[in-house]
Image (spheres, helix red, strand yellow):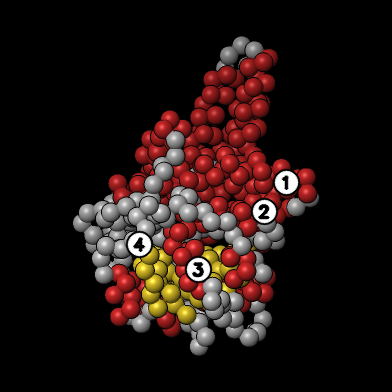
Amino acid sequence: MTLVNGIATVVALLLAVPCLVFFVECGVALLPGGRKDLSVPPPAPRPRAVVIVPAHDEEAGIAATVAALRPLLGGDDRLLVVADNCTDGTAAAARAAAAEVIERHDSTSRGKGFAIVFALDHLEAAPPDVVIVVDADCRMSSEGVAILAREALASHRPVQAEYVLATPEHPTPRGVLSALAVLVRNRVRPLGLRRLGLPSQLTGSGMAFPWDVLRAAPHLGANLVEDLVMGLELALAGHPPAMCPAVRVSSELPEGDEVALGQRRRWEHGQLATLLRYAPTLIGRGLLRGRADLLALGLDLCVPPLALLVTLVGAAVLGTSALAMLPGGSKVPVGVSLLALGAVGTSVLAAWTKFGGDKLPLRYAFLVPLYMMWKIPLYLSFFVHGKHKSWDRTQRKGETAPPAARPPPD
């Protein structure tokens, strides 16, 4: 029983680490900050920027995206749409909307990473100061291009805008809870890290890079979370990403639970695989080299997707409670597990109240257990069958059937 108590205590403490990281990140983000968070670099000559929009079979929506981005451009800026392995009129629609367009056709190399490298090769002859990547279904806030370009050039590091997912017009309860999870992952926790003076992860859209930094980045091809991995590789190379809450990029969650589950499967399988591969390296190098930025990114990466974190800690509470009721069973593991679960639950509710607003009503909180049950098969498939290995295009609003597989903008 002494051995069992010891093992249970170690497991409870290991699970408490990501809970503590989550609690600190959310807690710092919840502190009053306001205008300081929205501060931007002092006025300076505007860098020459190219906004790259990777797009695959986006004929229906690319014109609206181009129209929304064009007013954000300066006189020396360019808007470059990469029509990647398209089977529809994406290229023609983008040209008609007055975007510069290049087309790539390579069915054996599918992924957003390939599209970005193709664009960089195209820009090599006359490179800009800054490259900004925006997904084909996203919208950016006013002055976003100028702010991101100035901050990336001034800091000489990648800069990530606040990237959030809006709930659809007719959201399902699962959709609301998914939007909450993304809000905490992409807005609340990075804001806490920024206030602590620490870097955060790249989240996929609204990313700005100094030209030389991006050109030296490793080619990640079809990696399921190429944006996340790119940020980690750049951090290891000395260019950790920074969050820029003064700029917001948004897109809509997909309509329909099955489409949403497919999207979450790709994201979260990729995140879990990246956690296992990179977290030990980041933490180890951070400790050995005395680099707080790498240590912070490694610990942040150790926080699994929210539903999985709550499921694991909840299971630990049940298991350690059963142990405590046995003769000779220790109450320490159940105490640690309860504190960890309470820290996560308190953080989520506080973040929900402050940042969710009317768009994510608290009345859906009672459905959290059902949402977690919905996600369990997703996580089991990762541990049993391995990560999802291919890109599948996310079905857009108004589409009646999923289109062909492609490198999605998320």
Q: Amino acid at mark 1?
A: Arg
Q: Residue at x 65, y 59 (%)?
A: 240
| Helix, strand or loop under label 2 | helix
Give residue 285's mark: 1
How far apart in space, not on screen, are marks 4 and 2 (Cα)? 32 Å
Q: Amino acid at mark 4?
A: His
| Helix, strand or loop under label 3 | helix
How far apart in space, not on screen, are marks 3 and 2 (Cα)? 24 Å
Q: Position of residue 377 (x, y in %)?
A: 38, 35
| Helix, strand or loop under label 4 | loop
Residue that numbered label 3 is attached to: 121
- Nearest to N terminus: mark 3 or mark 2: 3
Q: Residue at x 52, y 41 (%)?
A: 273
Q: Residues within 10 Å of mark 1 (few under 14, many from 20)?
A: some
Q: Position of residue 32 (x, y in %)?
A: 63, 64
Residue 67 lies, with reference to residue 174, above or below; the image says below
Mark in the foreground, 4 or 2: 4
Residue that numbered label 2 is attached to: 236
Q: Residue at x 43, y 74 (%)?
A: 80
- Nearest to N terminus: mark 1 or mark 3: 3
Q: Position of residue 188 (x, y in %)?
A: 55, 57
